[in-house]
Image: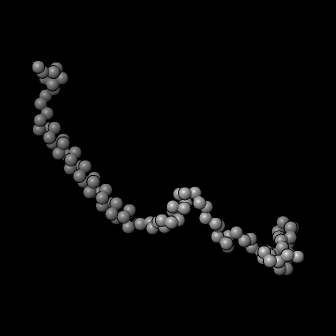
Amino acid sequence: MEYASQSALPSLGPRRWRLAYHLAVVLAVKLVLLALLWNIFIKPNRVTVDVGAMSQRIAGAVSPAPAASSVPSAPSASSGASSNGSTVSPPTSPGDHK
């Protein structure tokens, strides 16, 4: 039993193989170019990851802020006040009690 759509279409045997061959060649060329571009631009740029720091970050542990950024800069000795008019006392050590 033949289907109507098969009998109405002309035979595409050689043309179909030529199209499949052409598509296979184009896909192979694209894969070669993609691999070449990846090796040139992506592969050399490696990122090193500290496993301990990354596991703490993923687990949600917050690392302490760096000491230099947590201490405000001291005002100049001649002015004795900050730019907004409030006075800033120098930091004291835990043993200093007045």
Tell me, yes or no, if residue 40 can be seen here. Answer: yes
Tell me, yes or no, if residue 8 can be seen here. Answer: no
Residue at (20, 50) in percent of width and height: 25
**58 or 79: which is nearer to us?**
58
Left/right of residue 54 with respect to residue 82 in the rendered view: left
Rendered view: 5 above or below 46: above
**68 or 77: which is nearer to us?**
68
Which x, y percent locates residue 89? 83, 73
Residue at (51, 61) in percent of width and height: 55
Left/right of residue 69 with respect to residue 60 in the rendered view: right
Which x, y percent locates residue 24? 21, 47
Q: How is the image coloured?
A: one colour
Which x, y percent locates residue 75? 80, 75
Quarter of image, res 45: bottom left
Q: How many marks?
A: 0
**34 or 52: which is nearer to us?**
52
Rendered view: 36 above or below 23: below
Q: Quadrant of the C terminus?
A: bottom right
Left/right of residue 67 with respect to residue 53 in the rendered view: right
Residue at (82, 69) in percent of width and height: 83
Q: Quadrant of the N terminus?
A: top left
Quarter of image, res 44: bottom left
Which x, y percent locates residue 70? 70, 69
